[in-house]
Image (cartoon, coloured by chain):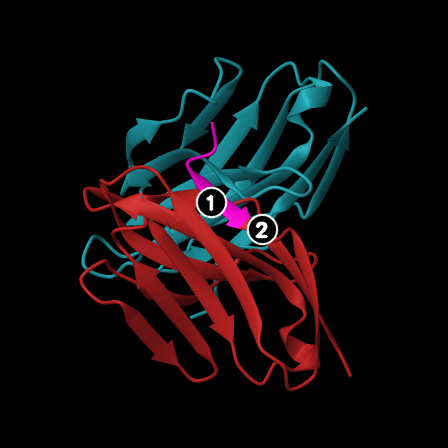
Amino acid sequence: QQQVKQSPQSLIVQKGGISIINCAYENTAFDYFPWYQQFPGKGPALLIAIRPDVSEKKEGRFTISFNKSAKQFSLHIMDSQPGDSATYFCAASMQNSWGKLQFGAGTQVVVTP
Amino acid sequence: DTGVSQDPRHKITKRGQNVTFRCDPISEHNRLYWYRQTLGQGPEFLTYFQNEAQLEKSRLLSDRFSAERPKGSFSTLEIQRTEQGDSAMYLCASSRTSGDEKLFFGSGTQLSVL
């Protein structure tokens, strides 16, 4: 049973547009929510992460929005670039085992020129 | 910082054979994790080590799987009597001890069981 549900499976966005990926979780014990970016043939790389004590975190063109009551969080990629074309995974873990991540199924993002 | 290194990058084997993968974590990273990723899915946690101690194993890790980290540095993951369902990308990751929640992944070993 997947503990973190991610949508959409894929999305296509034009260069300069905004990519939005959503995730939902059930386990209220989760308290660490990272996003990973993965290119073909490579391992996932940490992009940005948030804890539930804040509702938003921004790093460059990447923003996480977090809604604790709805048990949802999302990744916004502003001014999307062709180099952002990759698969993005949301994940969640608990404080006492933060490296034991529950990943979503991934979203393949394609940014067209 | 040379990153997490995994060897081999690709492994093709016949059903029933044993295979072993190696992971070299980032130096001075105390924690080492193994994950498995199948096509179109997110990685799934298998097991992790703090130094040489294996602290947790997922129920996904059947008796045919064994992992070691004998000196608290590199780790090996062995699969005995491989099955076609074992075909996947096996990812290794490392991190410092708690307080720095950054998990660094290697590029993985792609296993194909024929």
- Chain part drawn in magenta: A1-6
Task: Tell me where residue A40 appears, x and y as whole percent.
Answer: 70, 59
Q: Which chain is red?
A: A
Identify the chain of the residue marked 2, using the numbered disc in the image. Answer: A
Tell me, yes or no, if residue B11 can be seen here. Answer: yes
Identify the chain of the residue marked 1, using the numbered disc in the image. Answer: A
How packed mark 2 is, by other alpha carbons closer than 10 Å (few <14, some 14-19, many 20 or more), is many
Q: Are discs 1 and 2 less than 8 Å apart at CB?
A: yes
Identify which residue is drawn at 46% across, 39% down: B34
Which quadrant of the figure contains the C terminus of chain B?
Answer: top right
The correct choice, above or below, for A101 with respect to B13 in the image is below
The correct choice, above or below, for A54 with respect to A104 in the image is below
Magenta-colored stretch includes residue A27: no
Tell me, yes or no, if residue B74 can be seen here. Answer: no
Q: Mark 1 points at which residue?
A: A103
- Closer-to-camera residue (A39/A86): A86
What's under tag 2, amino acid-wise? Gly
Q: The cyan chain is which one?
A: B
Q: Name the residue under label 2.
A: A106
Q: In this view, does B27 lie to the left or right of B82?
A: left
Q: Which residue lies furthest to the right in this view?
A: B114
Q: What element carries label 1?
A: strand
Identify which residue is drawn at 59% across, 31% down: B20
Task: Tell me where residue B27 appears, x and y as whole percent.
Answer: 36, 60
Q: Do labels 1 and 2 share a chain?
A: yes
Which quadrant of the figure contains the N terminus of chain B?
Answer: bottom left
Residue B53 occupies which quadrant of the picture?
A: top left
Identify which residue is drawn at 65% across, 82% down: A81
What's under tag 1, amino acid-wise? Phe
Identify which residue is drawn at 67% across, 78% down: A83
Residue B79 occupies which quadrant of the picture?
A: top right
